[in-house]
Amino acid sequence: MSDWANRHGARNARKDGPRPSRPSNLHHPPRPTVEYRTAEFSFPCIRSGAQPWHTIGMASESVTLRLAEPRDAQAIALMSRDLVEAGLGWKYDAARVLRAIRDRDTITLVACEGGAVLGFGIMEFGDERAHLVLLAVGPAQRRGGIGRRLLQWLLDSARTAGIGSVHLELRAQNEAARAFYRAMGFSESVLVPGYYRGREAALRMLRVLRVPGPPPFVWQPPALGQK
């Protein structure tokens, strides 16, 4: 969770530049077509009869990663409210998440199984830096490798896009999250008192993907037919 976008103004991403490259082997499972009415709406990625994220326990091997769609916005927002922003007020509501899903400089990734959203990650891309805005996995699915898969996929996407470093903030008292990010190669950089609405300190962490500067030259074979 982060107020990064608000604190630093417009992102340094090139709005006219190319989108970050994404691995081409991302599996898109068949999606049920279900019409939801507003009064009955809860988790848009849940099919009729499926259990919500907080009641399902399963191995990460059975979970599919895919890019989020607009219908996933409410499910992601509710998980952010309950699992990330608890006690701090709800900033990443469905409207804000929907903007992230539609933003060309942001990747919103979800982990699904049986139609249910079990976890998600949101990463914003700039020229040299990427920012991990949110990452969460339902309590029943934790310690099954889902969070690691989500984060690793986002890191691979950042590396493919030529990003030099990935940055994030987390609650300074969240020891489990600190241990997780350390295990994923992140280093602690600075403690920011009162970062979260003046109530809690944040710990900033980063992972360097390459030395800052232009992306290294990648050799390409000459086009056929050229002399």
Image (spheres, helix red, strand yellow):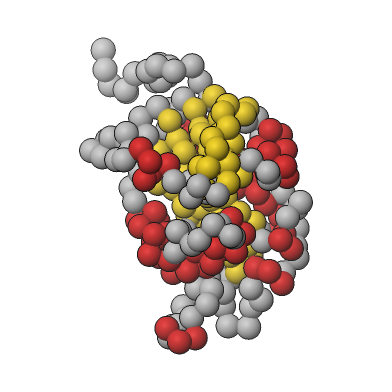
Is residue 220 visible in this depiction of the protein? yes
Q: Could you tell whether 150 is left or right of 107 in the image? A: right
At 64% from the left and 40% from the top, the residue drawn is 172
Q: Is residue 95 above or below residue 212?
A: below
- Choose top left, top right, bottom left or bottom right for residue 148: top right
Q: Could you tell whether 64 is left or right of 167 in the image? A: right
At 61% from the left and 44% from the top, the residue drawn is 171
Q: Position of residue 207 (x, y in %)?
A: 57, 28
Q: Position of residue 117 (x, y in %)?
A: 58, 65
Q: Position of residue 31 (x, y in %)?
A: 50, 70
Nearer-the-camera pick, 184 or 81:
81
At 64% from the left and 56% from the top, the residue drawn is 137
Q: Quadrant of the C terminus?
A: top left
Could you tell me how many numbered marks the image carries? 0
Q: Could you tell whether 118 is left or right of 130 in the image? A: right
Q: Is residue 186 above or below residue 198?
A: above
Nearer-the-camera pick, 40 or 150:
40
Identify the residue at the far top of this view.
Answer: 227
Q: Could you tell whether 58 is left or right of 23 in the image? A: right
Identify the residue at the far left of this view.
Answer: 16
Q: Position of residue 131 (x, y in %)?
A: 47, 38
At 75% from the left and 53% from the top, the residue drawn is 144
Is residue 65 visible in this depiction of the protein? no
